Amino acid sequence: MTRGIKHRKKAKNKGSKKEGGPSSSLAPQIPVKVWQPGVDKLEEGEELQCDPSAYNSLHAFHIGWPCLSFDILHDSLGLVRTEFPHTVYFMAGTQAEKPSWNSIGIFKVSNISGKRRELVSKVETDDSGMDGEDSDSDDDSEDEDEDVAKGPSLQLRKVAHQGCINRIRSMPQNPHICAAWADTGHVQVWDLNTHLNALAETETEGVQGVAAVFNQDPLYKFKHKDEGYAIDWSLLVPGRLVSGDCDNSIYLWEPTSAGAWNVDNAPFTGHTASVEDLQWSPTEPHVFASCSVDGSIAIWDIRLGKSPAASFKAHNADVNVMSWNRLASCMLASGSDDGTISIRDLRLLKEGDSVVAHFEYHKHPITSIEWSPHEASSLAVSSADNQLTIWDLSLEKDEEEEAEFKAKTKEQVNAPEDLPPQLLFIHQGQKDLKELHWHAQIPGMIVSTAADGFNILMPSNIQSTLPSDGAL
């Protein structure tokens, strides 16, 4: 298992001065080489540079202390949004150096811009507090909108939280309600509606200096015997929650009419090691899945007692994360400590071998995995190898197409022979990647968190099927 941030360091805002890269057109031109993760090594003095043409949008930001976990909040700005600039609401939990320094961050990132295809190559990014497109080069396009030139803006509010936050999740039906797993062993439910309303009413541009920290009490608190990471809200029953801990136990939370929760003191047991992740079924209100350090995945039905309805060996190492496909509910994806990714068709469980796809591309632990909310065959994965990869299971190797491409490029650009044809995109540049999420209302947008902050990215080769009437 790989969980905590390796080196907790509070990020600081940098000035607009850009350092390191040559700014003169007289500088010697270095031949460009395509970087092959896991194959090539950086020599002393070498550094990787992003190819902006690979992205429709790419921004970086931080909120101070690194965040192990975050969630994207459902908003009322439109069910399917395709036009730039975008606005996104988040909540995240910090991993501060001292327990009392932690907080839940509630923040809005607005004016998230994207370039028209002919302008993509002119995007420049840095890792300052808010990655803007305020390039100080002389060849900025004159026809960019004034708002786009200003770059994204970040508005942040904080709620004091005792202890580091291992995982945080927003309730799908009521996004202002969130559950946060603390390293103190507590799971707490919070109402952040006041802060979200305040953010919705603010139009302050740029990064705020020092965000105020508000003190408030959680709606409800439950103490596990040990800390944990696994938590998930039901998609079908508002307020229903499960939380799993490092003591191998899973607890069911049921909402009450009084705005609180009843937590069953008798846990679900069956795993022989820490429960690492939980996922409710997208179609069955009483069914959820769990994965564990014991290498197994279990399927549970809360109507049938406290033992799993089914359990199977999923990986040869810890199963760190899992994702239940909401568009194809028979498909379950999981990621392991050995870097492997497995896709299972749950309809085949009774037949024994339910694995329909298995990838060994990553060589370090998988830290996050999530199916696309817009394409049933696509999923995104993050790994401790500092790569975020996007996969499309519908793709197959096409030798004729590859031959045409090699001829067109005169074989100057060749992919490694063992590269899976389903691997659609590789994003790098973050250190100690921990978690990612697709934006359910902005097709093609992915947000990731790492020790050095957040990235918002929209790869240029991600094509999502959209309703015919466009943005809603």
Image (cartoon, rainbow, N blue to C red):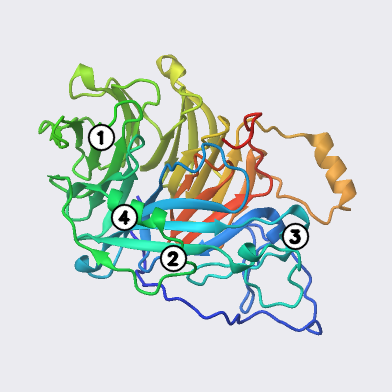
Question: Residue 67: x and y, percent?
Answer: 36, 59
Secondary structure found at label 3: helix
Q: Is residue 23 left or right of residue 385?
A: right
Q: Nearer the viewer, residue 195 or 396?
A: 195
Q: How many marks?
A: 4
Q: Name the front one of labels 3 and 2.
A: 3
Q: Name the front one of labels 4 and 1.
A: 4
Q: Earlier in the sequence, mark 4 or mark 1?
A: 4
Secondary structure found at label 1: strand
Secondary structure found at label 4: helix
Q: CA distance from mark 1 to mark 3?
A: 45 Å
Q: Tell me, yes or no, whether the two marked residues, 2 and 4, touch with CB atoms within 8 Å.
A: no
Secondary structure found at label 2: loop
Residue 469 in the image: above or below residue 31: above
Q: CA distance from mark 4 to mark 1?
A: 23 Å
Instruction: Identify residue type, mark 3.
Output: Leu
Q: Residues within 10 Å of mark 2 (few under 14, many from 20)?
A: many
Q: Which residue is mark 1?
A: 241
Q: Which residue is mark 2?
A: 62
**Label at residue 119:** 3
Q: Residues within 10 Å of mark 4 (few under 14, many from 20)?
A: some
Q: Earlier in the sequence, mark 3 or mark 2?
A: 2
Q: Tell me, yes or no, whether the two marked residues, 4 and 3, touch with CB atoms within 8 Å.
A: no
